[in-house]
Amino acid sequence: MSRSFCLLLWQAALRVSCHVVTASLCMGGSNIFASVRENSPLGQLISDISIRSDPGANTVRLCLTGPNANWFYLEGRTIRLNSSASRVLDREVLGPFLIAELTCYEDDIKQSHYRILVEIQNENDNKPKFLEETIQPFSISEVAAVNSVVFTVKAVDSDGDMISYTIDQSSENACFFRIDPPNSGKVVLNKPLDYESRTHLQIIMWAQESNTEEKFNISTVLTINIEDVDDQYPHFLPCTPVSPDVPVCMNPTYSANITRKYQDSVLEFSPGPIRAKDGDRGINAPLLYTILSGDDHGRFVMDNRTGEIRLTRAVDDRQPAANFTLTVMVCQVEDWLKYSLATVLVRVLSVNSFPPLFNTTTFKGFIIQSSSPASIVSTYGNQVLQVQVFDWDFPDGVNPNIRFFLHPPSRLFQVTQEGVLIARTDKLQAFDRHILQVVARDEESGEEASASVDIEVLQRGQAVPHGAFTEQQLFGVVDSRLAGGITALILLMFLSAFLFLLLRFVRRRRPQEANVLPAIAVGKHPKVSSRSPGFIDESVSRQASSQSDSFHGRQGLYTRRQSLPPPTSCSSSAADSTSKPCLPAPSSEVSLSDPAGRCHFQTELFVVVEKPESGLYRWDRTPDVTAGLPSTGQCTEVHAGTPQCDEEFKTDQSQDT
C-alpha cells in the first residue's frame, strides 16, 4: 500500500516538468543548438524536437533538466522561452548562453538524453557608465608640465560597445585640457596652471558609444584642484597688474611729507603703509623688510617685521637736499632669492600756515547748447571760466601742488588741473541749471577748499551775458525776446496812464475857460469898474466877431448887434500898448488893466439876455440900455429861473492883431 502511494507521488512530480506523449518518440533525436535575442517575450520559439516515433512503443515522457531549464517549457514537439515582465531575458545578467537537457522516458525507462545550448543574442539596451574611482576629484600641481597626462577617466558599456571620450567645450575651464586619443580617456594639460589665479577647475566629460547606431552616452562633472607651489615672489601692496591678462604686480612708489620739525615719529605714507605679501597665497611665507639705500646715516630706520619707517632725528636747516629717496626690499625669510624692491620718497615741506582759498564762493558759468561732445564753460563776456585758489604760504599766492576735482564726480562736467571746466555739451538741455562743487586740495598738506559753480545752459544762438545785472538775471531763464515784450508792455501801460491823466486835466480846464465870458458879460469880474453895469474885454469882443460874430460856451450863444457903435480900444499890438496910453470914452468907461498896469481899455458895453434857441442860449441886447444894472454882483434870473452868477477869472491880456 505504501509502495504504491509513493509510486503515484513520484509520477505526479515527474508530470510537473515532463510532457506525456502517447507515441514512441525517443528514437531519432539529437542535441539542440539554438539562439534567441535578449529581452524576447514569453513563448518565443527556441527549437523543434526531432525524435522519430516508434509504433510499438508505449507512452513516453520528455523532461527538461539542467541549470537553465526554468527558462524553457515544452509545448507539443517544440521548446519555447519561459520569460515574464518581471523576469527579462538579459544577456548581461545570465551570460551569453542558456544550458539545459532533454531526457526521454519510455514506460518510465530512460531511453535517450540530449543537450540543449541556446545562445542569447546581445541587444544595445545599456548606456555607458563611468567607473567611480576614475571620476573622483583630482589634484594637480600648478607647475605641471603642459602636454603631459594629468589624469585618466574610464567608462564601460555592459553591451561591450566601444567608448569614445570628449570634453564639453561649453565648460568654463575646458580650454585647460584635451583628450588624446579620443577613445583612451587620457586627459592632457593644454595650458599652464596658476594657483594665484584659480584654485580649482571644473569640466564636463562625455562618454559615448562609437560603434552602435543608438550612440548612447553619459556625462559627468570633473573637479580638478590645483596645488600651490612656492613659485611666486613677494610684492608690495597695493598691487597694480601690468595688464588684465598678466598677473604680475607693479610695485608702488610710497611718499610721505614731513617738516623740519618732525622727529622721532612713524611716517605715514601714500598710497598706504609699506606692506608686502607673498605671491603664493596658499603658502603665505613670512617676509623680511630692510632699507637698502637712502637711510641718511640712520636718520630713517625700518622695522624688519612690520615695514614701518621711523624718523630718528629732525632735518637740519642746513640740509642741502629737500627730499630723501629710499630703496626698500622685502624677501622671504626662508628664501632670500625671492625678493622685491620698492621706492620710498620723503619730501621736506615748509610749515603750512595758510590754507588754500578760492577768490569767490560761487562762480557763474554759461554753456551754449550744441551737438559738440565737449565744450569749455564760459563766464560773463564770453570769457573762459577758470576757478582759482590762492595759498599765501607762497609769495605769489600760487601753490603748484593744488589739484582740482568735482565732489561728487559728475558725468557731464570735468575740471582740469588749471581750473577750466569742460562740459559734455551734447548731453545738456537748454534752460537746464547745474550746481557743482569744485574742491581744491593741497597734495602736500592735504588741506582742502571748496566753491560752488552755477552753470546755466543757454539755447542755441543765445549770447552769453556781459555782466551780472542783465536782462537775463532780471527775468531768470525767460527768453530775452519774451523779456523785451514784457518791458514794452509795461512802458505802454505807463504811457496810457499818462495820456489818461492829461486828457482828464484838459477836460477839467475847459469848463473853467467857458465860464469866463458870461462873467464878463454881466460885469462880475473883480477887475471891472463898478460904474458900468456890464462889459466885456475888447480882445474878447474882437475874437467873438472873428468867429462869425458869435462864440460858444457853457452859458449859451453870445451875439453882438451890428447897429451898436464900435468900441474904443487900445492898439492891437503889444508894442503900441507900451507907447500909447489908453484914453477913456466920454460915455461908458471900462477900466481893464494888464498885470503891469500899462494900459487901460475903454469901450461901450451892452447888456445881453439869454434866450433858448435850439437847445442853446442866445443873448440879445435889451431895449433899456440906459437903465442901470445892479453892480453888486447879485445873480439875475435870465432863463427858466436859472441863476447866472459871477465867476472870477484872469482876463486875457493879449490883443487881436
Image: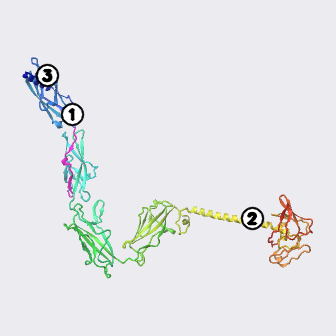
Could one spot residue 541 in this view of the protein? no
Q: Quadrant of the C terminus?
A: bottom right
Residue under pointer 2: 507
Residue type (three-letter) at the residue carrying disc 2? Arg
Q: Nearer the viewer, residue 540 or 638?
A: 638
Horizontal and vertical percent position of residue 27: 9, 22
Boundaries of the magenta span: 125-144
Which residue is the site of mark 1? 86
The amino acid type found where label 3 is placed reads Val
Mark 1 vs 2, N-terminal side: 1
Q: Amino acid at mark 1?
A: Ser
Q: Residue at x 72, y 64 (%)?
A: 504
**Residue 173 is inside the magenta segment:** no
Q: Position of residue 415 (x, y in %)?
A: 42, 67
**Residue 20 tag number:** 3
Residue furthest front as drawn: 1
Q: Is residue 508 above or below residue 161?
A: below
Q: Earlier in the sequence, mark 1 or mark 3?
A: 3
Q: How many marks?
A: 3
User: Which type of secondary structure does the marked residue at label 2 adopt?
Assistant: helix
Quadrant of residue 262 within the rendered picture? bottom left
